[in-house]
Image: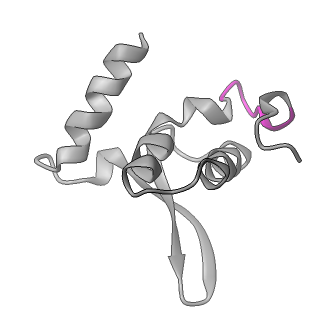
Amino acid sequence: MNPTDETRTKIGGIKPSDYLAIDLWHRSSGSMQYYIDDQQNRAASMNAPIDATYEIREPGGRTGKWATVSALREDHPFRAVYAKALEERK
């Protein structure tokens, strides 16, 4: 699958690019764009929470569970980054 072809992975009205927190989280840690695209596609195909940041993994592999912005401490700096990006996106 072409990771930039959002029409193929659009699930329930949520497009991969709607997963802004995944993009911001991974860009801030230096991830490559192909990896970010893959994670956004995976989130859309799994109907992950819209504020997902990354898929939680354990030694046995993927869990199907997602870390989210809403689960971060109230004072976590990423919350402010995410809120600003959401506001700019409007």
Residue at screen point 53% across, 75% down: 57
In this rendering, the answer to whether 55 lies above or below 78 is below
Question: Foreground residue, 17 or 49?
Answer: 17
Question: Foreground residue, 89 or 67?
Answer: 89
Residue at far left of view:
75
Q: Quadrant of the C terminus?
A: top left
> Where does residue 10 sit, x and y in percent of width and height?
77, 32
Question: Foreground residue, 75 or 33?
Answer: 33
Q: Is residue 64 left or right of residue 87?
A: right
Residue at screen point 25% across, 45% down: 78
User: Of helix, strand and loop, which mostly describes the magenta segment?
Assistant: loop
Q: Is residue 32 left or right of residue 21?
A: right
Q: Is residue 29 left or right of residue 37?
A: left
Residue at far bottom of view:
59
Asked if the stretch drawn in magenta spans residue 24, the answer is no
Q: How many marks?
A: 0
Q: Which residues are magenta?
A: 8-14
Q: How is the image coloured?
A: one colour
Residue at screen point 17% across, 46% down: 77
> Where does residue 13 sit, x and y in percent of width and height?
70, 24
> Where does residue 56 sit, x and y in percent of width and height?
50, 68
In this rendering, the answer to whether 27 lies above or below 20 is below
> Where does residue 72 sit, x and y in percent of width and height?
25, 53
Residue at screen point 50% across, 37% down: 50
Residue at far top of view:
90
